Image (cartoon, coloured by chain):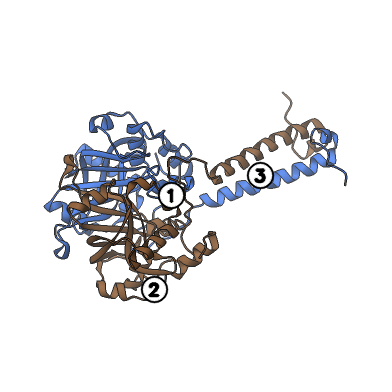
Chain colours: A brown, B blue
């Protein structure tokens, strides 16, 4: 069988060019379509839940503070996390009294005003609210794994340098219409725009944690405990998060 | 201005063909290079903890199964997650009896052999092990948020379509040197290569969960409960995870 002509030699052959071009066009279209598919927001609207664009899952350019700055690190991890796992004592019949864990979207204040207090938008239909009605004790867990810092650093999720923060305390409902309620609701809806359209018949309310203990793993040598007073008093606006949103989002600020 | 020639008309023009082809080749090369850059591993080693290359944080091409396939979905979410939050009852003096939550790196079997059972590499120095010594009840939470599926779909972390799985039960230590111990250890070290170099003085052992209840949120309309028997009996090798590792990793399989 004759060998195929080398690419450079065959440039003058119109038939071959046409065929090669067709292949390349198809290839390029495939690649474009593949890219587009991943970028296009799928119009997948169901019920009253709408989709949400969250770019805070990407690591911020600023990155976390030095690991020795415990208070700064604790506040950074919470402010830069969009969701927490929240541990409660279950009231489900099959596992009554067992510790349970659920995913909750959170904020600790507006993008420009971090408070260090985690706020939640809760429905009585959800596991967490039902557990809390019987026992208000909880632990809120957030990790730098969420910001992609650990992946970028090639840290295993359990590596102690992949900082994780555990806030333990009692969960408290915030009074409807109070200044704190308005502040927290605006902050939740700012960071999680989809919340504004979540089903209205779910009787959403807002809760926060009254923090009793702050544990953090952020380096080798075991967990650190941070005084709640120092943590709450720390002056931190979370500017890097605000800038991040301003750059990547079209959020009215 | 003259209208551009239609593509079919210009096929005979060799110069135009060559130019178009060149553009397409450059474009294709750019796209290929862009893809390659994202795949390149970075080296970053520290102390006794070595870094780990985890590409499972990216969404797999296959994606999760249809949300109506409850057992398939539950097994997919666990097998495709690298870490879980694990809820236990705390023994820490300041929060004794509170539910606590911690990050643990996990596997449910080797890349090629999913079992549906979460396995953990645990040190008695860690919160979780100390809690479990007093009370072996726990809940293991994993979410598609980990695989980037939710982000790609523009789902809020709490959106019910961002599937989350909660396995509740009792944690059990696996006997050193038993066949299950060897299987689980090999699987843990395969998925989390850094574990092989974690400090030897930490008295690591391996635990698994004896699952009592499986709850899952994977669509609108409230949580679903999956019979443990059906879940464990489901024939699933997690092939997409194996292929994913083979493509992006240089792991000896």
Residue at the disc numbered 1 = A197
Q: CA distance from mark 1 to mark 2?
A: 30 Å
Residue at the disc numbered 3 = B28
Q: CA distance from mark 1 to mark 3?
A: 41 Å
Tell me whether the residue at label 3 lies in contact with that at label 2, contact meaning CB atoms closer than 8 angstroms. no
Tell me which label, 1 or 2, sits earlier in the chain: 1
- The answer to whether residue A199 of the structure is visible from this angle is yes
Q: Nearer the viewer, mark 1 or mark 2?
A: 1
* Number of on-image labels: 3
* Chain ID, mark 3: B
Residue at the disc numbered 2 = A236
Asked if residue B146 lies left or right of residue A18, the reply is left
Tell which residue pokes out farthest to the right in this image.
B2
Residue at left 34%, top 33%? Answer: B70
- The answer to whether residue B49 of the structure is visible from this angle is no
Relative vertical location of residue B92 with respect to residue A23 in this rendering, above or below: below
Which is more toward the observer, B10 or B111?
B10
Relative vertical location of residue A164 with respect to residue A123 in this rendering, above or below: below
Element carrying mark 1: helix
Q: Position of residue A61 (x, y in %)?
A: 49, 65
Which is more toward the observer, A183 or B94?
A183
Q: Nearer the viewer, mark 1 or mark 3?
A: 1
Q: Position of residue A37 (x, y in %)?
A: 56, 41
């Amino acid at each position: 069988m004759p060998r195929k002509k080398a690419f450079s030699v065959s440039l003058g052959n119109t038939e071959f060019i046409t065929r090669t071009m067709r292949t390349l066009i198809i290839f390029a279209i495939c690649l474009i379509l593949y890219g587009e598919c991943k970028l296009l927001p799928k119009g997948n609207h169901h019920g009253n839940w709408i989709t949400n664009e969250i770019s805070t899952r990407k690591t911020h350019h600023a990155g976390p503070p030095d690991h020795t700055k415990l208070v700064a690190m604790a506040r950074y991890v919470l402010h830069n996390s969009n969701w927490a796992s929240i541990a409660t004592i279950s009231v489900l019949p099959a596992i009554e009294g067992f510790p349970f864990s659920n995913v909750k979207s959170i904020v600790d204040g507006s993008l420009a005003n971090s408070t260090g207090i985690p706020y939640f938008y809760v429905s009585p239909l959800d596991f967490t609210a039902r557990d809390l009605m019987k026992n208000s004790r909880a632990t809120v867990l957030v990790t730098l794994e969420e910001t992609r810092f650990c992946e970028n650093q090639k840290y295993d999720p359990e590596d102690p340098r992949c900082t994780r923060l555990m806030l333990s305390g009692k969960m408290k409902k915030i009074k409807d219409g109070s200044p704190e309620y308005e502040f927290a609701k605006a902050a939740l809806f700012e960071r999680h725009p989809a919340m504004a359209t979540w089903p209205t018949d779910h009787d959403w309310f807002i809760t926060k944690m009254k923090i009793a203990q702050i544990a953090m793993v952020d380096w080798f040598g075991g967990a650190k405990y941070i005084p709640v007073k120092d943590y709450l008093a720390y002056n931190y606006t979370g500017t890097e998060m605000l800038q991040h949103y301003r750059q990547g989002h079209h959020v009215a600020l």
